[in-house]
Amino acid sequence: MTALREPFHSSATDSLADALKALLDETLMLAEALLSPGKIIGEVEQMRSLQVAADNIETTDPAQAEVLRARASRIGLR
């Protein structure tokens, strides 16, 4: 069925279900962070050290600095 022929309430129901799932996911992530703050603190410290290292080598090795920043940006997404 194409989107033009789909009943309005179907897409509204899907949107509501998606919003509720996102809310539940965020609530679970918050609860996990509150129950184990050491993990979050460790990840932030890792990101910070990679950012500092990238800043220190930016002028001499910009490609490696970009690699370090990319690694820092992915911490916590695993």
Image (cartoon, grey):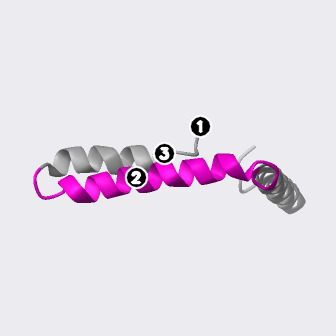
- Image point (33%, 57%), residue name: 52
Place of residue 5 in the rendered image (x, y in percent of width and height, measured from the top left): 77, 54
Q: CA distance from mark 2 to mark 1?
A: 18 Å
Cβ atoms at labels 3 and 1 below 8 Å apart: yes
Q: Secondary structure at mark 3?
A: helix
- The residue lying toward the viewer, choosing from 49 and 21, is 49
Place of residue 36 in the rendered image (x, y in percent of width and height, measured from the top left): 76, 48
Question: How many residues crowd mark 1 within 10 Å: few (<14), some (14–19), many (20+)?
Answer: few
Q: Label 1 sits on what residue type?
A: Arg
- Image point (85%, 60%), residue name: 16
User: Which residue is identified by label 2?
Assistant: 49
Q: CA distance from mark 3 to mark 1?
A: 8 Å
User: Which residue is identified by label 1?
Assistant: 78
User: Which residue is identified by label 3?
Assistant: 74
Q: Relative to 59, is 71 on the left or the right?
A: right
Q: Relative to 16, is 72 on the left or the right?
A: left
Q: Within the magenta stretch, is there residue 48?
A: yes
